Image (tube, coloured by chain):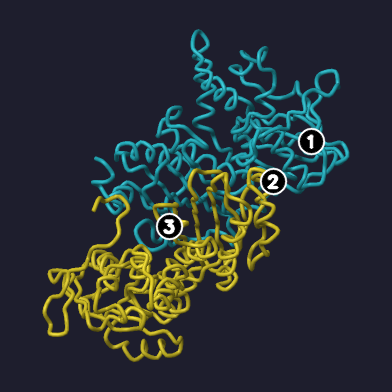
Chain colours: A yellow, B cyan
């Protein structure tokens, strides 16, 4: 059914009917505001605004994946503070020629991840728009002392969870309309691009056990996000290029693209964090317990050091600090 | 300075520098998520998405007014639940040809109301977009038991705060490019349209003293929003047309437009609420204390009654239930 027939209130009713009342939700969708319980004395709040043809193209993503990813990138921010996500507000600007099946597909992707992560949809707004707009705000419980970007010290180890570069490389290859024998590998890279996994358990455990001195999720690119940590902490950093954890799919293309996408591809949604050297054993144990690699990829330095990537023989490799800025011209 | 020169991070820094750290804010703008204190055990959350050429035209509003209004409409939703607003998240999609002075003007309007109402800006997102997009999420303390839409009973009085119709009539006249002797009156109507006042004290006092059985803010139009209360409460309602509180500016045009804009103009952001008949005295006293008219304009009826507007001689007047739906075709 076209949305112009269903109407705004019809659409809200449709979403409400499909939304289970979540844990801690006293009033959900359908009143002037949602009423939610605060499990602890403070909350974490984050928001993202995704715009068609700026952040995504419907030619290159399914609406199911878009629903998943729009929530995932916000959950990733909560993870990067060590929080426990609880409530989500979803506002949509929808082109008038969309039909309700398209919105249902978006909503299924969104709801699948919300259910998996225990996050309750409590409200939002729906409007007509020229291009699809997805605006999300997530509220989490600050169950542990949040980890800021600003706590790193020279000498701290630098870690990354999972693997990096898959998302950026996948997007690049998608844009190149890659075909042929390597398509199964491309599918793996694209799965990382379209359905990133917010590292909620890792973030919360690192905060709970006070293992991370500074933390951020990699959205703009590893080097650019490391730059945010360094600026906030007043440090420099050295990254060892050969230690970057690359997936088998990425490695299959590494002879052509090197570490470019690992260093600055962006949208990995892995956690980049710093930790004291004497916590190496505990971080190793945590990674084992969570079945999630936490790879030591460098070390924090004094700020005069700047951000440096060194290759296997200790020589400066690429600077690779270029990430994404929505307003800057290339 | 053009935003393409200032850059996304430059813009965020600029906003951060101008944002005072608010009450209860432990981490504000500039990390992955904001960290805020919960003053009471539960929160109220509301969000609105405003899109250029759907909700506003830059031809007809200043950016200062837009900043004010974008926050005001969200605060109005918190008011309609009887909450106390605390934190706000502001995400902007900004056309690339905007300059920083335009964003500053928006932000001044936004900040003026935030300061006045004690609301702290704690985060958000900025992006480039084709048309201006303003997405706001407000979190409030549920200091008193929230007032829902669903508590009205047949026989309850129906009240409206302030005056209704100014905003809708002002917009209509603006669109008609009205000039001449009546321009000072138009300015008064437009002030209501561009800079609505969220009725925060009234909402909180009605909740605190448990005087309102159901409440909503008038955004879609009085009759449509009354319809939301009636549907949620399972009642009907009768509105006495001649009791509608009209401003002197509205009255100057009433011979031409009647009560049309008062009944269905929308964007009044007054509080429409129901109350038991034995609370008339207390509501009268509250209105006196707050220097805000609370006018009894009708009575809740059994649902079979439907929504009826009657004129002075008790005859049905206009139905006037048509309000705004973003997807429906006229």
Q: Do the numbered discs 2 and 1 sit on residues whose CB atoms are within 8 Å?
A: no
State the SS at label 2: loop
Q: Position of residue B211 (x, y in %)?
A: 72, 43
Q: Which residue is mark 2?
A: B209
Q: Is residue A191 left or right of residue B219?
A: left
Which comes before the other along the chain, label 2 or label 1?
A: 1
Give the alpha-carbon distance from disc 3 to disc 2, as whole Å: 49 Å
Q: Which residue is mark 1?
A: B157
Q: Position of residue A282 (x, y in %)?
A: 37, 89
User: What's the chain of the residue with tag 1?
Assistant: B
Q: Position of residue A312 (x, y in %)?
A: 16, 84
Q: Residue at x 25, y 83 (%)?
A: A243
Q: Do the numbered discs 3 and 2 sit on residues whose CB atoms are within 8 Å?
A: no
Q: Residues within 10 Å of mark 3 (few under 14, many from 20)?
A: some
Give the alpha-carbon distance from disc 1 to disc 3, as whole Å: 50 Å
State the SS at label 1: strand
Decide which of A47, A250 is in the foreground and name it: A250
Q: Residues within 10 Å of mark 1 (few under 14, many from 20)?
A: many
Q: Which residue is mark 3?
A: A56
């Amino acid at each position: 059914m076209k949305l112009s027939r269903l109407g705004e209130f019809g659409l809200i009713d449709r979403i409400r009917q499909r939304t289970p009342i979540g844990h801690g939700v006293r009033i959900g969708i359908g009143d002037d505001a949602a009423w939610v319980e605060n499990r602890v004395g403070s909350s974490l709040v984050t928001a993202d605004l995704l715009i068609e043809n700026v952040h995504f193209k419907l030619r290159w993503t399914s609406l199911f994946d878009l629903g998943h990813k729009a929530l995932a990138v916000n959950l990733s921010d909560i993870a990067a503070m060590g929080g426990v996500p609880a409530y989500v507000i979803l506002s949509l600007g929808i082109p008038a020629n969309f039909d309700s099946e398209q919105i249902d597909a978006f909503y299924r992707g969104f709801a699948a991840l919300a259910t998996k992560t225990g996050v309750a949809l409590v409200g939002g707004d729906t409007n007509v728009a020229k291009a699809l707009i997805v605006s999300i705000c997530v509220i989490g419980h600050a169950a542990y002392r949040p980890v800021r970007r600003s706590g790193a010290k020279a000498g701290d180890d630098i870690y990354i969870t999972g693997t990096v570069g898959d998302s950026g490389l996948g997007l690049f290859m998608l844009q190149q309309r890659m075909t042929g024998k390597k398509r199964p590998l491309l599918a793996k890279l694209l799965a990382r691009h379209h359905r990133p996994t917010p590292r909620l358990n890792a973030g919360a455990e690192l905060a709970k056990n006070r293992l991370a001195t500074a933390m951020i999720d990699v959205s703009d690119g590893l080097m650019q996000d490391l730059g945010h940590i360094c600026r906030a902490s007043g440090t420099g950093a050295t990254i060892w290029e050969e230690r970057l954890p690359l997936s088998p799919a990425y490695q299959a293309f590494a002879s052509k693209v090197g570490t470019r996408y690992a260093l600055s591809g962006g949208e990995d949604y892995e956690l980049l964090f710093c930790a004291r050297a004497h916590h190496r054993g505990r971080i190793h144990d945590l990674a084992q317990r969570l079945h999630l690699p936490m790879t030591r990829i460098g070390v924090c330095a004094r700020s005069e050091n700047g951000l440096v990537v060194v290759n296997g023989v200790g020589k400066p490799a690429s600077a690779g600090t270029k990430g994404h800025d929505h307003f800057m011209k290339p």
